[in-house]
Image (tube, rainbow, N blue to C red):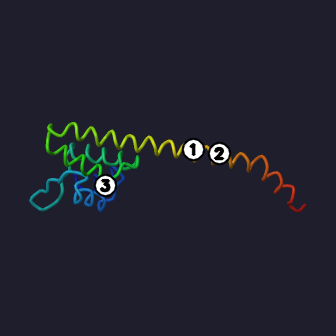
Amino acid sequence: MTISEVSKKYEISADTLRYYERIGLIPKIYRNGNGIREYTEEDCRWIEFVKCMRGAGIQVEALIEYIKLFQEGDSTIEARKKILIEQRDHLIDNIEKMQKALERLNFKIKRYETRILPVENSLKPF
């Protein structure tokens, strides 16, 4: 697949794909004789993985380290697992914070609907 096809498929700009490759967030992409990137299915799986992890707020640095270790082979399995566990723990903490914020917003909206809105409606001119 070309960079434009991958960009459309995963809804990621071509610039972002090039950036991800440059910083090591995805492995180096093969280029044909004309210098055009040709993405394989394996490359696309990495893009799916990175997109999912970034969408969840996983740190770029952690993903770069994970991918670097992955490329080093099976001797890094424990180190990779440790990174994933640490990032999962951060994600759990963030979910808990977001849940608390959601509950507070729901409370404020309910209060607005039951207390403030009726008062505002009574002040409207006839």
Q: Residue at x 37, y 40 (%)?
A: 88
Which mark lies nearer to you, 2 or 1?
1
Residue neighbourhood size for the residue with mark 2, other residues' Cα within 10 Å, grouped as few (<14), some (14–19), many (≥20): few
For residue 53, side relative to residue 97 (left or right): left
Residue where numbered disc 2 is placed: 106
Q: Is residue 20 left or right of residue 11?
A: left
In which quadrant is the C terminus drawn?
bottom right
**Residue nearest the viewer, comparing 14 with 28:** 28
Indicate which disc, 2 or 3, sits on the residue closer to the N terminus: 3
In the rendered image, the vertical position of residue 65 relative to residue 80, given as above or below: below
Distance (Cα) linking label 3 and label 1: 35 Å
- Image coordinates of residue 15 in percent, x first then y, are 29, 62
Q: CA distance from mark 2 to mark 3?
A: 37 Å
Q: Give the residue at mark 3.
A: 7
Mark 2 vs mark 1, CA separation in Å: 10 Å
Q: Earlier in the sequence, mark 2 or mark 1?
A: 1
Q: Which residue is mark 1?
A: 100
Element class at badge 2: helix
